[in-house]
Image (cartoon, rainbow, N blue to C red):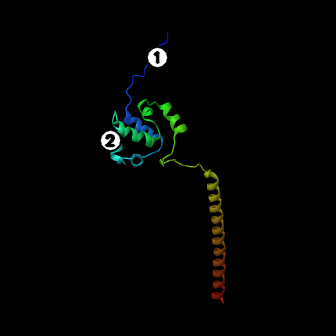
């Protein structure tokens, strides 16, 4: 005989909406604009604080977030990550948001800039030395002319 245990925890739908929105890198204002009702940022904030969200509103938010209403009602973190990574669909002109931050090898850039600075510094130092020699030569010439 097998026993099936039901998850007794109460799922707070507003928190689920907030978590899904953050996981996708969407701001409250952008999520509101993605919904047909064009919710304000304040309205999304209010919705995210609710335990149970009205069904029509929940449907709009689910579509905007690329998940089903059932997914929100039965939310768990593992399902959320899988669904977002594998099943997110951008049909019907839904907004695709990607937090694109490419990684560059900054060490080579810094090294080349440092080499350029050292080269420029060397050139300027040499120019100062040359000018110092010219000034010394001119001072010697002036001294000779005064002595004569």
Position in image of residue 1 (x %, y %): 49, 9
The numbered dot on residue 104 is none
Position in image of residue 20 (x %, y %): 45, 38
CA gap between label 2 and label 1 equals 36 Å
- Taking the image as shown, residue 68 lies to the left or right of residue 86, namely left
The quarter holding residue 19 reads top left
Considering only vertical position in the picture, is 45 above or below 71? Answer: below
Question: Dot 2 surroundings within 10 Å: few (below 14), some, or many (20 or more)?
Answer: few
Mark 1, secondary structure of its residue: loop
The quarter holding residue 59 reads top left
- Taking the image as shown, residue 126 lies to the left or right of residue 59, namely right
- Taking the image as shown, residue 42 lies to the left or right of residue 5, namely left
Position in image of residue 112 (x %, y %): 65, 58
Among all residues in the image, which is located at the extreme top?
1
Q: Nearer the viewer, residue 37 or 138?
A: 37
Among all residues in the image, which is located at the extreme bottom?
148
Q: Identify the image quadrant of the C terminus.
A: bottom right
Q: Nearer the viewer, residue 142 or 76?
A: 76
Q: Residue at x 43, y 20 (%)?
A: 6
Considering only vertical position in the picture, is 32 above or below 3? Answer: below
Q: Residue at x 63, y 69 (%)?
A: 124
- Number of the front mark, 2 or 1: 1
Q: Residue at x 64, y 74 (%)?
A: 132
Mark 1 highlights which residue?
Answer: 4
| Mark found first going from the N terminus, 2 or 1 | 1
Position in image of residue 63 (x %, y %): 44, 41
Whether pointer 2 and pointer 1 mark residues with C-beta atoms closer than 8 Å, the reply is: no
Count the marks. 2
Q: Residue at x 65, y 59 (%)?
A: 115
Mark 2, secondary structure of its residue: helix
Mark 2 highlights which residue?
Answer: 46
């Amino acid at each position: 005989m097998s026993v099936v245990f039901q998850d007794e925890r109460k799922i707070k739908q507003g928190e689920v909406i907030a978590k899904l929105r953050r996981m996708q890198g969407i701001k409250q204002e952008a999520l509101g604009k993605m919904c047909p009702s064009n919710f304000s940022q304040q309205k999304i904030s209010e919705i995210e604080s609710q335990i149970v969200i009205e069904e029509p509103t929940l449907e709009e938010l689910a579509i905007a977030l690329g998940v089903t209403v059932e997914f929100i009602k039965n939310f768990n973190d593992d399902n959320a990550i899988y669904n977002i990574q594998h099943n997110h669909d951008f049909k019907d002109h839904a907004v695709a948001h990607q937090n694109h931050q490419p990684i560059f090898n900054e060490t080579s850039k810094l090294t080349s800039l440092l080499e350029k600075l050292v080269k420029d510094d060397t050139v300027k130092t040499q120019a100062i030395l040359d000018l110092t020699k010219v000034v010394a030569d001119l001072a010697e010439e002036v001294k000779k002319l005064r002595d004569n």
